[in-house]
Image (cartoon, grey):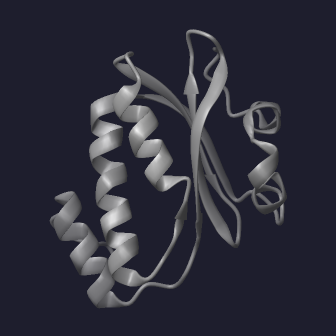
Amino acid sequence: MKHSNDISLLKKFTPNEIKSEVFSSEITFFKYYQRNKSEELRELIIHIDNANYSGLFINGGDSSVRILTEFTGETIGILAGRNSVYFFKLYINENVGELISFILIKRKKRTEEELQLMAKKLGVKEIPH
């Protein structure tokens, strides 16, 4: 798959069940990239733990953990983005060019304490202000 930030990729791979949320407002960030599956899985599990702590719900989180765990490839394609209300990641099997899973998170303003805790879990030493 071509490494492109063309919005047509997002339109192609966004599943109908979250399409209205993804396109509910202007997309303010959008990026396609490849990542090591194990690293993505580790980070996703941390995000789910943080969401549970802060009361957020990650739509597709648990199923994405299961699907990424079972995925046999070492590298996964990711379409990540956000609009004013939601953050999303679409996980793509590049070998067959199809969506295998997604996460959708309704964004919220985080407290300083929440930011510090998340940074610590992710191994970030200093949060820029």
Q: Quadrant of residue 128?
A: bottom left
Q: Nearer the viewer, residue 2 or 38?
A: 38
Query: In which quadrant will I find the C terminus?
Result: bottom left
Q: How many marks?
A: 0
- The image quadrant where one finds the N terminus is top right
Q: Residue at x 33, y 41 (%)?
A: 41
**Residue 106 relative to residue 123: left or right:** right
Residue 82: x %, y % from top left: 64, 59
Q: Is residue 55 above or below residue 126?
A: below
**Is residue 1 in view?**
yes
Residue 8 screen position, x and y as percent? 83, 32
The extreme top residue here reads 95
Q: Is residue 36 visible?
A: no
Residue 31 horizontal/vertical position (percent): 60, 40
Whether 21 is drawn above or below 64: the answer is: below
Name the residue located 23 percent from the left edge and 59 percent from the top edge: 122
Front-most of 100 and 97? 100
Query: Percent from the top left, x then y, of residue 61?
Result: 48, 54
Residue 50 in which image quadrant: bottom left
Q: Is residue 84 above or below residue 38?
A: below
Residue displayed at 84% across by 59% down: 20
Could you tell me which residue is drawn at 82 percent across and 57 percent down? 23
- The one of 80 and 69 positioned closer to us in this rendering: 69
Residue 66 appears left or right of 5: left
Q: Is residue 121 left or right of residue 111?
A: left
Residue 129 vs residue 50, the one in the foreground: 50
Quarter location, residue 111: bottom left
Q: Is residue 46 above or below residue 126?
A: above
